[in-house]
Amino acid sequence: MKHIVALLCLFISLQSSAQKVDAETLKTIYNTSLTNGKSYEWLDHLSNQIGGRLSGSLNAERAVEYTKEELESLGLDKVWLQPVMVPRWVRGAPEFAYIETAPGKTTSVNICALGGSIATPYGGVKANLVEVKSIEDLKALGKEKIKGKIVFFNRPMQADLINTFEAYSGCVDQRYSGAIEAAKFGAAGVIVRSMNLRLDDFPHTGSMSYGDLPNSQRIPSAAISTNDAELLSGMLSLDKNIKLYFSQNCKQLKDVQSYNVIGEITGSEFPNEYIVVGGHLDSWDLGDGSHDDGAGVVQSMDVVRLLKESGIKPKRSIRVVLFMNEENGLRGGKKYAKVAKAKGENHVFALESDSGGFTPRGFTFDCSDAVFNKVLQWQPLFKPYLIHYFEKGYGGADINPLKESSKTLVLAGLRPDTQRYFDHHHASNDTFDAVNKRELELGAATMTALVYLFDKYGTSTITAEKQLKN
Amino acid sequence: MKHIVALLCLFISLQSSAQKVDAETLKTIYNTSLTNGKSYEWLDHLSNQIGGRLSGSLNAERAVEYTKEELESLGLDKVWLQPVMVPRWVRGAPEFAYIETAPGKTTSVNICALGGSIATPYGGVKANLVEVKSIEDLKALGKEKIKGKIVFFNRPMQADLINTFEAYSGCVDQRYSGAIEAAKFGAAGVIVRSMNLRLDDFPHTGSMSYGDLPNSQRIPSAAISTNDAELLSGMLSLDKNIKLYFSQNCKQLKDVQSYNVIGEITGSEFPNEYIVVGGHLDSWDLGDGSHDDGAGVVQSMDVVRLLKESGIKPKRSIRVVLFMNEENGLRGGKKYAKVAKAKGENHVFALESDSGGFTPRGFTFDCSDAVFNKVLQWQPLFKPYLIHYFEKGYGGADINPLKESSKTLVLAGLRPDTQRYFDHHHASNDTFDAVNKRELELGAATMTALVYLFDKYGTSTITAEKQLKN
């Protein structure tokens, strides 16, 4: 009995001493990020010296060069570019649109072409409108009422959802699939209410798809600002016969060569076990992509730097991966996963930051219940930093393809405060001034802390997981 | 035994049904605030139609009138003004300051007079500087090194504190007491680094005090922007003989009549038990006081409105109190408490919002452990709204004087995200555009939810408390 008690005491004392070490390490990580972080300085360059980084653009290539150089300056074990072919869509001349209530009586409205859309015919499109709230509404109307008209998708994001990403998910089908569905009924074009919870004048772009629709049947598709969506809807309720004119000359060009940017600290004990931390280097072209996803890029870069600055020598190999082309193709994420699979690389954990640079609240984990219960034990370590949100959920678009390569891979997504995110998302006001330095740095520290814990305790987690599955 | 089991089952079933009702009520409150809130519209008026509301100013009186009218429009049981005499300090003509490296070689810097400061002598002050990090540093230097010089307090807010209010508390003695301490050593004036974690060009004002110092010994005191504090410190490190010039013509005038604005829903069961929810109506004069404390004012106003809109009929009397003169005197808070005490009003709970209109994270509670444990039982109800922070702590400056009137009074403060707050606090960029509608509305809903729960369960809490004390 004495021996058991002594062993138990030893176990408890070891455990509490490990907890103490972890608490101290997290404190070092957060302090370093808040007093000696690099994320904000990097974001300043990426946003203000480079700017919007649409896949295939010169800016995207400048961002590849810049981040590669910066990673090289950190003294990592390896830094390299992973080639990937990306689509190249260009916006062309600024879009132009107005509401016409009578010949010559017009009111300008703010629109932007959706990413992937075709141009309007030379001279633009002018037509009557049909306002719908959903694709179901559209189908219920049928060809007769739609043919030759501009379909105006005007379902707002649901304001009473606390998580604004849920509100986004509940609306984005209008933007992504509105054109292909309206084209089937012979519409002349599509105008979609911007995915924005706020009433303002910024149109928000984002990807859309024509699926397999033949070129001849494709119709132009644009987003309208929420203020102008309200205006248009109000005017339509007074007079069904008003017209909308819009013109855009965007174009899909041939795929071009681009790159994922990768840096690695090679693990001291298990160099063949990989932990990935990343964000996406490309952005939309309207703003400078500070929140989406400049923030995720610089936070991920600072994870490897903060590990080094905090004197942590990872047991596993930690890779920062700056993915290309998340916004309109996901080619970078797919390519990274493909290469990892081909090489048989054992990825054990991947963490993505792609929800803005706002105050971090926690993580979502894409993993088994057994692993999640293990992860929950780390939650108290994060309490001093007001990180409270540990839930099962999606990791991230870029890391998701990695799932194919391993059944035991754990994915996680950083979850910042979401309330302001869609004020800026894919719009010209996604700019550096909307990012707060401390919020960004807290996010970088929070990611570093989780990577530190996964690296330290990873094997036992994964082993437990394997045992459960076997 | 059967009876006991049956009773137990009944008790559990009643409890879980009460929890269900509470969960539904909170959902209604949050939904109403996010889809049909008034706080943002009120703040728009207060910030953009009225503006900065320094005690004793015309704007402060306009804010009294406006909020009284708006409360009257809500159909409350009573709305009234509570007279209170307030100090009146005026900034006068814009301040002006420069660093002089040699006669005629000057660099302008951004300063603002601290609230309560005297003016500089006619023509301004020009003198050499002594840079110190603290009042202790100042005392260590002594009269000889300080006499005739401008004391430059330059201790920055501590960046590695997660709660920025802690960093503020750790620095604000320089602003509040810098002048009185420097005057004792014969300084010519005081320049204080702005209480701001960010490096930018905005000087941040705030209250300072001369204590009992005779008028003849008082010296002028101003805040300098963080960028210019860095510049000045850097230039001083190169040349101790540079001079600073500053001029300001602020003035303390006679006290004037003002008011607390009060609205009440009279309780249906316990009308003589009072619950107070409030913020302060006055603000500094540089910005429009949107975060400090326009946000708290409109959130408090919306608490009584949201209770009504959500169909809640309070058992206790709910008072919204818009306190005057928190910033430079606390006269409103003291007056309200004095009147409450004189009338023998039984205040059971008071909640203040005075930490900005950012995403709410929770509350601090100033109460006994017994009450706090009771309150903690409500915490799960807030989880769907990402409200996680329930800690013991300070309620708020305006409600604090109420403590004298009752030993069982529970005070609470709304705790929003603090990371951006001191970017705006007391500066000209504390403006409406820095407030996010949803964040503001989530705060109003969170306050309403807590008031609902305290109103519903208040007595048992207080009774338990009383029993424990007796």
Image (cartoon, coloured by chain):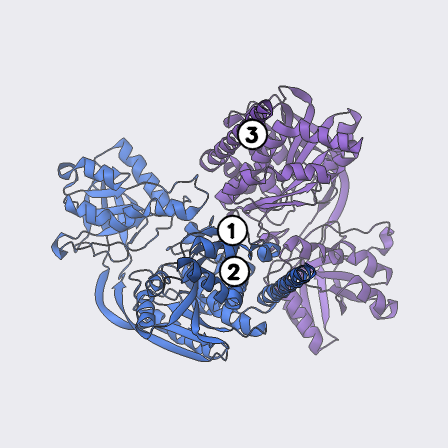
Chain colours: A purple, B blue
Question: What residue sits right under mark 3 in the picture?
Answer: A12
Residue toward you, B405 or A329: B405
The chain that hosts pointer 2 is: B
Q: Nearer the observer, disc 2 or disc 1?
A: 1
Give the farthest residue toward the front. Answer: B1
Residue B311: x %, y % from top left: 59, 74
- Does any portion of residue A280 appear in the rendered image? no
The chain holding disc 1 is B
Residue lying at the far top in this picture: please name it.
A268
Q: CA distance from mark 3 to mark 2?
A: 42 Å
> Where's residue A61, x and y in %?
65, 35
| Amino acid beneath label 3 | Ile
- The residue depicted at 33 percent of the width and 45 percent of the height is B171
Residue type, mark 2 in image: Gly
Task: Select label 1 or label 3 by which is in front.
Answer: 3
| Marks 2/1: CA–CA distance | 13 Å
Looking at the image, which is closer to me, B363 or A267? B363
Position of B400 relative to A362 (above/below): below
- Tell me the tag on residue B389: 1
Please state which amino acid type lies under the numbered disc 1.
Tyr
Could you confirm whether marks 1 and 3 are on the same chain?
A: no
State how far apart marks 1 and 3 are (Cα).
29 Å
Which mark is drawn over residue B443? 2
Marks 1,3: beta carbons within 8 A: no
Can you tell which of label 3 and label 2 is closer to the viewer? 3
Q: Secondary structure at mark 2?
A: helix
Label 1 packing within 10 angstroms: few (<14), some (14-19), many (20+) = many
Q: Can residue B404 be seen by looking at this rendering?
A: yes
